[in-house]
Amino acid sequence: MDHTRGKYAVVNRALDARDIAHRPTPRTMATNPSAAHPRFCSSCGTKLNANAQFCHNCGASIHGAPSQAQSGITSKALRWGVPALAILVLVLLSIFQLSSRGAGAASEERVPFGGGTVQAPDISSMSPEERADRLFNRVMRLSSEGKTDSAAFFGPMALGALEALVPLDAHRRYDVGLVSLVTGDVPSAKAQSDTILAQRPTHLLGLSLAARVADARGDATAARNFRRKLLAAEPAERATGRQEYTDHDADIRAAVEAARKQ
């Protein structure tokens, strides 16, 4: 019996030792790092709350992000700054346009063509006759210089100014016919020469224009006939002293010279 009790006592002590070895150690209470290490505002030095993102005293950011107060200031600056800048730009633009307009009034408009520019005549203050003459001379000069694109650009303007001088006399019909040839409207040019010759069959401008129209149509026979008539009529017609003969003296001389060479 005593032997059995002693055996149980040994077993119990062994079990107690095992329980002690496997008994969990009490956990230490987690410490709050924020409580152990309090934070302070870098701007005003106020002690910050544990989970604060911004200083509750001055509003400064804890992590470098802009505070609501700072964002409000930026928003107000944008709200008023952008319209103010736009108004300033508009004022400067208006001043520039006024100065450019003043400079443009003192100079003639330039129209681009190819590699350069063609200066457009200032015809705003001219009479209808002066405007027509100016545009006609511009078209014919450009055509003689081989600037066909520029002549074609001003051609419709010249025709419009000439046709506004109604009723058209022989002088203006001759001008319309020449500009029509420059723009490639041969039928219109022929209509003008026919009208001049219908009113006066020996009119030097009508015969000269008719010869040019025949050349444009490729009718060499008709061109020679009109030039023969021009040579025959030239002395008597010159004697009449018509103003259009004086105005287009160079054209008549060139036409007579060409007729003598055929």
Image: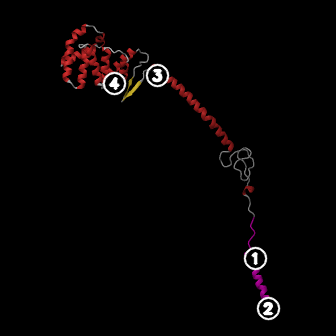
Residue 24 forms part of the magenta stretch: yes
Residue for point 67% across, 42% down: 70
Q: Which residue is mark 4?
A: 151
Q: Which x, y percent locates residue 8? A: 78, 86
Q: CA distance from mark 1 to mark 2?
A: 26 Å
Residue 248's disc is none
Q: Under tag 2, what secondary structure?
A: helix
**Are the two marked residues, 1 and 2, in contact with CB atoms closer than 8 angstroms?**
no
Q: Under tag 3, what secondary structure?
A: helix
Q: Which residue is mark 3?
A: 104
Q: Which residue is mark 2?
A: 3
Looking at the image, the residue that sits furthest to the bottom is 1
Mark 1 Cα shell of 10 Å, populated few (<14), some (14-19), many (≥20): few
Of the two numbered discs 2 and 3 on the same chain, state the one appearing first in sequence: 2
Q: Quadrant where the C terminus lies?
A: top left
**Are the two marked residues, 2 and 4, in contact with CB atoms closer than 8 angstroms?**
no
- Residue range in magenta is 6-28
Of the two numbered discs 1 and 2 on the same chain, state the one appearing first in sequence: 2
Residue 20's disc is 1
